[in-house]
Image (spheres, rainbow, N blue to C red):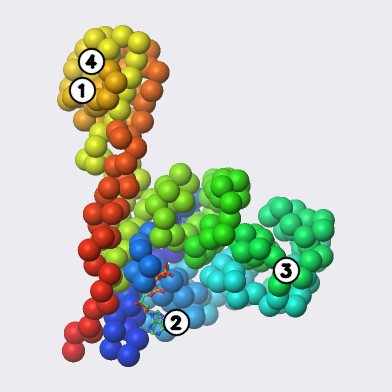
Amino acid sequence: MITIEHLTKAYGGQLAVADVSFSCPPGTVTGFLGPNGAGKSTTMRALVGLAEPTSGTATVGGRRYRDLPNAGRSVGVLLDAGAQHGGRTGREVLTLASRVLGVDRRRVDEALERVGLAGRPAGKRVGQYSLGMRQRLGLATALLGDPQVLVLDEPANGLDPEGIFWMRGLLRDFADRGGTVLLSSHLLHEVEAVADQLVVISGGRIVAQGSKSELLAGTGGTLVRGPDRALLAKALEVAGIGISAGPDDALVADAEALAVGQAVAAAGVVLTELRAAGGAGLEDLFRSLTGSSHEVQEVQA
Ligand SMILES: Nc1ncnc2c1ncn2[C@@H]1O[C@H](COP(=O)(O)OP(=O)(O)OP(=O)(O)O)[C@@H](O)[C@H]1O
Protein backbone atom coordinates (compact mmCIF):
# COMPACT_ATOMS: atom_id res chain seq x y z
CA MET A 1 0.00 0.00 0.00
CA ILE A 2 1.29 3.42 -0.98
CA THR A 3 0.01 6.22 1.25
CA ILE A 4 0.53 9.90 0.57
CA GLU A 5 -0.81 12.08 3.38
CA HIS A 6 -1.01 15.86 3.24
CA LEU A 7 2.22 15.98 1.27
CA THR A 8 3.54 19.47 0.63
CA LYS A 9 6.83 20.27 -1.05
CA ALA A 10 8.13 23.78 -1.61
CA TYR A 11 11.23 24.82 -3.51
CA GLY A 12 12.50 28.23 -2.42
CA GLY A 13 9.09 29.56 -1.50
CA GLN A 14 7.31 28.02 -4.49
CA LEU A 15 4.87 25.20 -3.89
CA ALA A 16 5.52 22.24 -6.21
CA VAL A 17 3.02 20.03 -4.34
CA ALA A 18 0.37 21.29 -1.94
CA ASP A 19 -1.44 19.10 0.59
CA VAL A 20 -1.62 16.02 -1.63
CA SER A 21 -3.28 12.91 -0.19
CA PHE A 22 -4.11 9.61 -1.89
CA SER A 23 -3.42 5.92 -1.49
CA CYS A 24 -2.76 3.03 -3.85
CA PRO A 25 -4.02 -0.34 -2.59
CA PRO A 26 -2.41 -3.69 -3.50
CA GLY A 27 -3.85 -5.30 -6.61
CA THR A 28 -4.44 -2.02 -8.37
CA VAL A 29 -2.85 0.25 -10.93
CA THR A 30 -3.15 3.94 -10.04
CA GLY A 31 -2.75 6.39 -12.89
CA PHE A 32 -1.23 9.66 -11.65
CA LEU A 33 -2.20 12.25 -14.22
CA GLY A 34 -1.49 15.88 -14.75
CA PRO A 35 0.02 18.34 -17.21
CA ASN A 36 3.71 19.25 -17.29
CA GLY A 37 4.84 20.82 -14.04
CA ALA A 38 1.76 19.62 -12.14
CA GLY A 39 3.78 17.99 -9.35
CA LYS A 40 3.77 14.31 -10.34
CA SER A 41 7.54 13.80 -10.29
CA THR A 42 7.92 15.75 -7.06
CA THR A 43 5.32 13.52 -5.36
CA MET A 44 7.05 10.39 -6.61
CA ARG A 45 10.48 11.66 -5.65
CA ALA A 46 9.19 12.35 -2.13
CA LEU A 47 7.76 8.83 -2.04
CA VAL A 48 11.11 7.22 -2.84
CA GLY A 49 13.19 9.44 -0.57
CA LEU A 50 14.71 11.70 -3.25
CA ALA A 51 12.91 14.82 -2.08
CA GLU A 52 12.35 15.73 1.55
CA PRO A 53 8.71 16.70 2.17
CA THR A 54 8.23 20.22 3.51
CA SER A 55 5.33 18.69 5.44
CA GLY A 56 3.20 15.57 5.28
CA THR A 57 4.29 12.00 4.63
CA ALA A 58 4.71 9.54 1.78
CA THR A 59 5.05 5.90 2.80
CA VAL A 60 5.04 2.35 1.46
CA GLY A 61 3.48 -0.23 3.76
CA GLY A 62 3.43 2.42 6.49
CA ARG A 63 7.19 3.08 6.29
CA ARG A 64 9.23 5.78 4.64
CA TYR A 65 11.20 4.46 1.68
CA ARG A 66 14.52 5.10 3.41
CA ASP A 67 13.38 3.10 6.43
CA LEU A 68 12.59 0.01 4.35
CA PRO A 69 15.21 -2.73 4.71
CA ASN A 70 16.70 -3.24 1.20
CA ALA A 71 14.08 -0.94 -0.34
CA GLY A 72 14.76 -2.16 -3.89
CA ARG A 73 13.43 -5.58 -2.93
CA SER A 74 10.06 -4.15 -1.98
CA VAL A 75 9.72 -1.08 -4.23
CA GLY A 76 10.74 -0.99 -7.90
CA VAL A 77 11.40 2.55 -9.08
CA LEU A 78 11.67 4.05 -12.57
CA LEU A 79 12.01 7.80 -12.43
CA ASP A 80 14.21 8.98 -15.28
CA ALA A 81 15.12 6.35 -17.83
CA GLY A 82 17.09 8.91 -19.83
CA ALA A 83 19.57 9.32 -16.97
CA GLN A 84 21.10 5.83 -17.24
CA HIS A 85 24.87 5.46 -17.69
CA GLY A 86 25.49 5.31 -21.45
CA GLY A 87 28.80 3.43 -21.35
CA ARG A 88 27.49 0.17 -19.92
CA THR A 89 25.55 -2.52 -21.72
CA GLY A 90 22.00 -3.32 -20.67
CA ARG A 91 23.19 -6.60 -19.17
CA GLU A 92 25.93 -4.83 -17.19
CA VAL A 93 23.44 -2.32 -15.80
CA LEU A 94 21.24 -5.13 -14.56
CA THR A 95 24.14 -7.23 -13.27
CA LEU A 96 25.33 -4.29 -11.17
CA ALA A 97 21.80 -3.72 -9.91
CA SER A 98 21.49 -7.41 -9.02
CA ARG A 99 24.62 -7.12 -6.83
CA VAL A 100 23.30 -4.02 -5.09
CA LEU A 101 19.97 -5.73 -4.46
CA GLY A 102 21.55 -9.04 -3.51
CA VAL A 103 19.49 -11.04 -5.99
CA ASP A 104 20.59 -14.09 -7.96
CA ARG A 105 22.35 -13.16 -11.21
CA ARG A 106 20.05 -15.54 -13.06
CA ARG A 107 17.33 -12.99 -12.53
CA VAL A 108 19.19 -10.67 -14.91
CA ASP A 109 18.40 -12.87 -17.90
CA GLU A 110 14.83 -13.35 -16.74
CA ALA A 111 14.41 -9.59 -16.44
CA LEU A 112 15.94 -8.96 -19.90
CA GLU A 113 13.58 -11.55 -21.34
CA ARG A 114 10.61 -10.05 -19.53
CA VAL A 115 11.14 -6.59 -21.02
CA GLY A 116 12.06 -7.75 -24.52
CA LEU A 117 15.77 -6.88 -24.36
CA ALA A 118 17.17 -10.44 -24.35
CA GLY A 119 19.66 -11.35 -27.10
CA ARG A 120 21.56 -8.67 -28.99
CA PRO A 121 20.03 -5.60 -27.30
CA ALA A 122 21.34 -6.85 -23.92
CA GLY A 123 24.92 -6.58 -25.19
CA LYS A 124 24.55 -3.10 -26.64
CA ARG A 125 25.74 -0.03 -24.80
CA VAL A 126 22.90 1.93 -23.24
CA GLY A 127 24.21 5.04 -25.01
CA GLN A 128 23.05 3.40 -28.24
CA TYR A 129 19.61 2.56 -26.88
CA SER A 130 16.51 4.38 -28.05
CA LEU A 131 14.44 6.06 -25.33
CA GLY A 132 11.95 3.17 -25.58
CA MET A 133 14.75 0.64 -24.96
CA ARG A 134 15.93 2.71 -21.98
CA GLN A 135 12.42 2.60 -20.59
CA ARG A 136 12.39 -1.16 -20.97
CA LEU A 137 15.76 -1.40 -19.21
CA GLY A 138 14.51 0.90 -16.47
CA LEU A 139 11.49 -1.32 -16.02
CA ALA A 140 13.74 -4.40 -15.91
CA THR A 141 15.81 -2.71 -13.17
CA ALA A 142 12.65 -1.87 -11.26
CA LEU A 143 11.42 -5.46 -11.51
CA LEU A 144 14.76 -7.09 -10.69
CA GLY A 145 14.29 -7.26 -6.93
CA ASP A 146 10.85 -8.88 -7.36
CA PRO A 147 9.14 -5.98 -5.54
CA GLN A 148 5.49 -5.80 -4.51
CA VAL A 149 5.28 -2.11 -5.41
CA LEU A 150 6.19 -0.26 -8.60
CA VAL A 151 6.64 3.51 -8.82
CA LEU A 152 7.00 4.57 -12.46
CA ASP A 153 7.32 8.14 -13.69
CA GLU A 154 6.19 8.50 -17.31
CA PRO A 155 7.22 4.92 -18.20
CA ALA A 156 5.51 5.08 -21.59
CA ASN A 157 7.73 7.96 -22.72
CA GLY A 158 9.45 6.94 -25.95
CA LEU A 159 7.61 3.64 -26.31
CA ASP A 160 5.89 2.96 -29.62
CA PRO A 161 2.22 1.87 -29.64
CA GLU A 162 3.18 -1.80 -29.51
CA GLY A 163 5.52 -1.02 -26.60
CA ILE A 164 2.78 0.84 -24.74
CA PHE A 165 0.42 -2.10 -25.26
CA TRP A 166 3.11 -4.47 -23.97
CA MET A 167 3.76 -2.33 -20.90
CA ARG A 168 0.07 -2.17 -20.06
CA GLY A 169 -0.08 -5.97 -20.13
CA LEU A 170 2.96 -6.23 -17.87
CA LEU A 171 1.55 -3.75 -15.33
CA ARG A 172 -1.90 -5.32 -15.41
CA ASP A 173 -0.38 -8.72 -14.75
CA PHE A 174 1.76 -7.30 -11.93
CA ALA A 175 -1.30 -5.80 -10.24
CA ASP A 176 -3.45 -8.88 -10.83
CA ARG A 177 -0.87 -10.87 -8.86
CA GLY A 178 -1.43 -8.53 -5.92
CA GLY A 179 1.16 -5.87 -6.73
CA THR A 180 0.70 -2.12 -6.27
CA VAL A 181 1.45 0.15 -9.21
CA LEU A 182 1.67 3.95 -9.25
CA LEU A 183 2.38 5.31 -12.70
CA SER A 184 2.41 8.87 -13.87
CA SER A 185 1.67 10.34 -17.25
CA HIS A 186 0.65 13.66 -18.72
CA LEU A 187 -1.34 11.74 -21.34
CA LEU A 188 -4.68 10.35 -20.26
CA HIS A 189 -4.89 7.68 -22.95
CA GLU A 190 -1.60 6.13 -21.89
CA VAL A 191 -2.99 5.19 -18.49
CA GLU A 192 -6.72 5.07 -19.09
CA ALA A 193 -6.66 1.54 -20.47
CA VAL A 194 -4.68 0.02 -17.60
CA ALA A 195 -5.49 2.10 -14.51
CA ASP A 196 -8.08 0.99 -11.96
CA GLN A 197 -8.04 4.32 -10.24
CA LEU A 198 -6.96 7.77 -11.27
CA VAL A 199 -5.48 10.66 -9.34
CA VAL A 200 -5.46 13.95 -11.25
CA ILE A 201 -3.09 16.70 -10.12
CA SER A 202 -2.82 20.23 -11.43
CA GLY A 203 -0.83 23.18 -10.10
CA GLY A 204 0.43 20.97 -7.26
CA ARG A 205 -3.05 20.12 -5.99
CA ILE A 206 -5.27 17.07 -6.42
CA VAL A 207 -8.23 18.06 -8.56
CA ALA A 208 -9.90 14.66 -8.87
CA GLN A 209 -9.44 11.12 -7.69
CA GLY A 210 -11.43 7.94 -7.70
CA SER A 211 -12.01 4.75 -9.62
CA LYS A 212 -12.17 5.11 -13.37
CA SER A 213 -15.86 4.26 -13.36
CA GLU A 214 -16.57 6.79 -10.58
CA LEU A 215 -14.84 9.50 -12.56
CA LEU A 216 -16.62 8.50 -15.72
CA ALA A 217 -20.03 8.44 -14.08
CA GLY A 218 -21.70 11.71 -14.83
CA THR A 219 -19.33 12.54 -17.67
CA GLY A 220 -21.58 11.38 -20.46
CA GLY A 221 -23.25 8.09 -19.57
CA THR A 222 -22.97 4.84 -21.49
CA LEU A 223 -23.58 4.43 -25.20
CA VAL A 224 -25.54 1.30 -26.15
CA ARG A 225 -26.57 -0.05 -29.49
CA GLY A 226 -28.49 -3.13 -30.53
CA PRO A 227 -30.33 -4.56 -33.52
CA ASP A 228 -33.70 -3.74 -31.93
CA ARG A 229 -33.57 -0.16 -30.64
CA ALA A 230 -37.14 -0.16 -29.29
CA LEU A 231 -36.59 -3.34 -27.29
CA LEU A 232 -33.35 -1.94 -25.93
CA ALA A 233 -35.03 1.31 -24.89
CA LYS A 234 -37.78 -0.66 -23.16
CA ALA A 235 -35.29 -2.80 -21.23
CA LEU A 236 -33.49 0.31 -19.94
CA GLU A 237 -36.74 2.06 -19.03
CA VAL A 238 -37.95 -0.99 -17.12
CA ALA A 239 -34.69 -0.91 -15.15
CA GLY A 240 -35.28 2.74 -14.32
CA ILE A 241 -32.35 3.96 -16.40
CA GLY A 242 -32.84 7.27 -18.19
CA ILE A 243 -32.06 7.33 -21.92
CA SER A 244 -31.49 9.86 -24.66
CA ALA A 245 -30.81 9.58 -28.38
CA GLY A 246 -27.19 8.89 -29.29
CA PRO A 247 -25.41 9.04 -32.64
CA ASP A 248 -26.48 6.72 -35.50
CA ASP A 249 -29.43 5.06 -33.83
CA ALA A 250 -27.53 4.43 -30.59
CA LEU A 251 -28.94 5.24 -27.16
CA VAL A 252 -27.12 7.02 -24.37
CA ALA A 253 -28.03 5.53 -21.01
CA ASP A 254 -27.69 7.60 -17.87
CA ALA A 255 -25.84 4.92 -15.88
CA GLU A 256 -22.52 3.12 -15.65
CA ALA A 257 -21.72 0.35 -18.14
CA LEU A 258 -22.18 -2.39 -15.52
CA ALA A 259 -25.73 -1.29 -14.62
CA VAL A 260 -26.63 -0.96 -18.30
CA GLY A 261 -25.21 -4.39 -19.11
CA GLN A 262 -27.09 -5.96 -16.21
CA ALA A 263 -30.36 -4.33 -17.27
CA VAL A 264 -30.19 -5.53 -20.85
CA ALA A 265 -28.98 -8.98 -19.85
CA ALA A 266 -31.93 -9.31 -17.47
CA ALA A 267 -34.26 -8.45 -20.34
CA GLY A 268 -32.48 -10.84 -22.72
CA VAL A 269 -31.79 -8.04 -25.19
CA VAL A 270 -28.98 -8.38 -27.74
CA LEU A 271 -26.30 -5.65 -27.84
CA THR A 272 -23.81 -4.82 -30.56
CA GLU A 273 -22.07 -2.02 -28.66
CA LEU A 274 -21.62 -0.90 -25.05
CA ARG A 275 -19.10 1.79 -24.10
CA ALA A 276 -18.59 5.12 -22.38
CA ALA A 277 -20.65 7.63 -24.34
CA GLY A 278 -18.62 9.60 -26.82
CA GLY A 279 -15.42 7.94 -25.56
CA ALA A 280 -14.32 11.46 -24.68
CA GLY A 281 -15.95 11.74 -21.26
CA LEU A 282 -12.77 11.18 -19.32
CA GLU A 283 -10.72 13.21 -21.78
CA ASP A 284 -13.07 16.17 -21.39
CA LEU A 285 -13.02 15.81 -17.64
CA PHE A 286 -9.21 15.68 -17.62
CA ARG A 287 -8.94 18.78 -19.80
CA SER A 288 -11.45 20.72 -17.77
CA LEU A 289 -9.70 19.76 -14.53
CA THR A 290 -6.17 20.50 -15.60
CA GLY A 291 -6.53 23.17 -18.24
CA SER A 292 -6.63 26.26 -16.13
CA SER A 293 -4.05 26.03 -13.39
CA HIS A 294 -0.53 25.77 -14.71
CA GLU A 295 0.79 28.52 -12.52
CA VAL A 296 2.98 27.66 -9.54
CA GLN A 297 1.56 28.92 -6.28
CA GLU A 298 3.30 30.95 -3.62
CA VAL A 299 3.79 29.34 -0.23
CA GLN A 300 1.43 30.84 2.34
CA ALA A 301 3.51 32.29 5.16
N1 LIG B 1 14.40 20.68 -7.78
C1 LIG B 1 13.52 21.64 -8.04
N2 LIG B 1 13.77 22.93 -7.77
C2 LIG B 1 12.89 23.92 -8.01
N3 LIG B 1 11.66 23.72 -8.54
C3 LIG B 1 11.34 22.45 -8.86
C4 LIG B 1 12.23 21.35 -8.62
N4 LIG B 1 11.59 20.21 -9.03
C5 LIG B 1 10.40 20.58 -9.50
N5 LIG B 1 10.22 21.90 -9.40
C6 LIG B 1 9.03 22.66 -9.79
O1 LIG B 1 7.91 22.08 -9.17
C7 LIG B 1 6.79 22.03 -10.05
C8 LIG B 1 6.32 20.61 -10.23
O2 LIG B 1 7.27 19.89 -11.01
P1 LIG B 1 7.20 18.32 -11.27
O3 LIG B 1 8.45 17.95 -11.99
O4 LIG B 1 6.90 17.63 -10.01
O5 LIG B 1 5.95 18.22 -12.24
P2 LIG B 1 5.48 17.02 -13.16
O6 LIG B 1 4.01 16.91 -12.99
O7 LIG B 1 6.30 15.82 -12.88
O8 LIG B 1 5.80 17.57 -14.60
P3 LIG B 1 6.37 16.86 -15.92
O9 LIG B 1 5.23 16.09 -16.52
O10 LIG B 1 6.79 18.01 -16.74
O11 LIG B 1 7.51 15.99 -15.48
C9 LIG B 1 7.26 22.69 -11.34
O12 LIG B 1 6.88 24.03 -11.32
C10 LIG B 1 8.75 22.56 -11.27
O13 LIG B 1 9.39 23.60 -11.98
Q: Secondary structure at mark 1?
A: strand
Q: Nearer the viewer, mark 3 or mark 2?
A: 3
Residue 245 badge: 1
The amino acid marked with disc number 1 is: Ala
* Amino acid of disc 4: Ala
Q: Nearer the viewer, residue 249 or 102?
A: 249
Provide the residue designation for mark 4: 233
Please tell me which residue is depicted at 24% across the width and 41% down the height of the picture: 219
State the residue at coordinates (31%, 46%).
Answer: 282
Give the foreground label among 2 and 1. Answer: 1
- Residue labelled 2 has its Cβ within 8 Å of some atom of ligand 1: yes
The mark found on residue 79 in the picture is none
Q: Could you tell which of marks 3 and 2 lies nearer the N-terminus?
A: 2
Q: Looking at the rendering, which quadrant does residue 224 occupy? A: top left
Q: Name the residue beneath numbered marker 2.
A: 51
Q: Earlier in the sequence, mark 4 or mark 2?
A: 2
Query: Are the residues at dot 3 and dot 2 in contact (C-beta closer than 8 Å)?
Result: no
In the image, taking residue 58 as reference, residue 206 lies left or right, namely: left
Q: CA distance from mark 3 to mark 2?
A: 30 Å
Camera-side residue of 126 and 201: 126
| Number of the front mark, 1 or 4 | 1
Three-letter residue code for mark 3: Gln
Horizontal and vertical percent position of residue 102: 73, 73
Name the mark nearer the viewer: 3 or 4.
Answer: 3
Q: With 18 as the anchor, is 91 left or right in this view?
A: right
Q: Confirm whether residue 95 shows in the render.
A: no
Tell me if label 4 and label 2 are in contact, CB under 8 Å: no
Q: Quadrant for residue 201, please give it.
A: bottom left
